[in-house]
Image: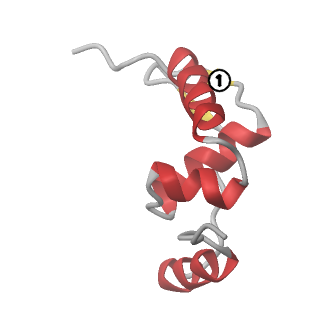
Amino acid sequence: MAEKYADKDAVKQREETIGVPVIVESAKLYSGEKISLTKKEKEILTLLSIYQFNKKEVAQYLDISRESLRTHLKNIRRKIPPKES
């Protein structure tokens, strides 16, 4: 059985460190324009940005393949273009 690095206890511990459970509910572009993210994309952004999971932990926690995670991240990047200087 593969070792699981990110589990429910890890999230609980990180929530306690932060103080409250946090979920990315919406996102806006730098211009202030709101963008539409799927539930899975919101979960991924939450785990990466708030809980500081690495990509391997995110895939394991969400029980998705690394390839699926790459696809979700690619879709997020398409929706959120880089900030122009």
Quadrant where the image shows the N terminus: bottom right
Identify the residue shown where x is 50% and y is 53%: 56
Which residue appears farthest toward the front when viewing the image? 1
Camera-side residue of 59 and 39: 59
Colour option used? secondary structure
The reply, left or right, for residue 54 in relation to residue 27 is left
Identify the residue shown where x is 71% and y is 54%: 62
Camera-side residue of 17 and 8: 8
Q: Position of residue 76 (x, y in %)?
A: 57, 26
Tell me where residue 68 sits by quadrant: top right
Q: Is residue 15 above or below residue 37?
A: below
Q: Is residue 52 above or below residue 69?
A: below
- Classify mark 1: helix, strand or loop: strand
Quadrant where the image shows the C terminus: top left
Camera-side residue of 18 and 62: 62
In the picture of the structure, the residue carrying the numbered disc 1 is 35
Tell me where residue 74 sits by quadrant: top right
Identify the residue shown where x is 73% and y is 54%: 63
